[in-house]
Image: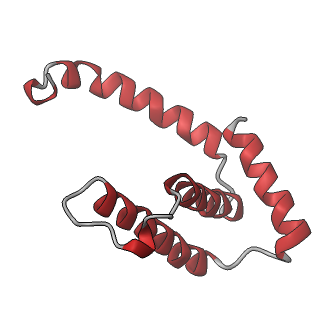
Amino acid sequence: MSIKQSQQDVDNWIKNHGVRYFNELTNMAQLTEEVGEVARIIARRYGEQSEKESDKNKDLGEELADVMFVVLCLANQTGIDLQEAFNKKLDIKTKRDHDRHHANKKLK
């Protein structure tokens, strides 16, 4: 599925189930909350902190999908074609970082 199709799917979901988009500031707060949930799982599951019993059943994929959903909402409501923006960003990063990463001794 393309990012463009994902944006359309989210827009359809909002129109059919969500009544309307939350405003941009609410969605920004929601995004921060969802990223925090991802960070908690990663810090405890892959970092040095021990994982709490209540966190062991948390699904990282589901939490990452929550992040994506809110990002897609923000893109829709601000008129961003995220597919176009992502393609442009990937091209910029490819041109800018290809040699830099290959030359980075820390990555070898």
Identify which residue is drawn at 43% across, 64% down.
56
Report the side of 67 relative to 7 (left or right). left
Colour scheme shown = secondary structure
Identify which residue is drawn at 49% across, 55% down.
60
User: Of 9 and 24, which appears nearest the observer?
Assistant: 9
- Residue lying farthest to the front in this orientation: 53
User: Of 55 and 43, which appears nearest the observer?
Assistant: 55
Report the side of 61 relative to 8 (left or right). left
**x and y percentages locating residue 21 in the rendered image:** 74, 74
- Residue lying farthest to the right in this orientation: 16
Quadrant in the picture for residue 86: top right
**x and y percentages locating residue 85 in the rendered image:** 56, 41
**x and y percentages locating residue 62 in the rendered image:** 58, 57
12 lies above or below 50: above
35 lies above or below 45: below
User: Of 91 and 44, which appears nearest the observer?
Assistant: 44
- Residue lying farthest to the left in this orientation: 105
Report the side of 4 relative to 105 (left or right). right
> How many numbered marks have been drawn onto this rendered protein structure?
0
Identify which residue is drawn at 67% across, 46% down.
81
Report the side of 40 relative to 1 (left or right). left
Can you say which quadrant of the picture contains the N terminus?
top right
Quadrant in the picture for residue 22: bottom right
**x and y percentages locating residue 58 in the rendered image:** 50, 64
Can you say which quadrant of the picture contains the C terminus?
top left
User: Of 11 and 63, which appears nearest the observer?
Assistant: 63
Quadrant in the picture for residue 79: bottom right
Identify which residue is drawn at 50% across, 69% down.
34
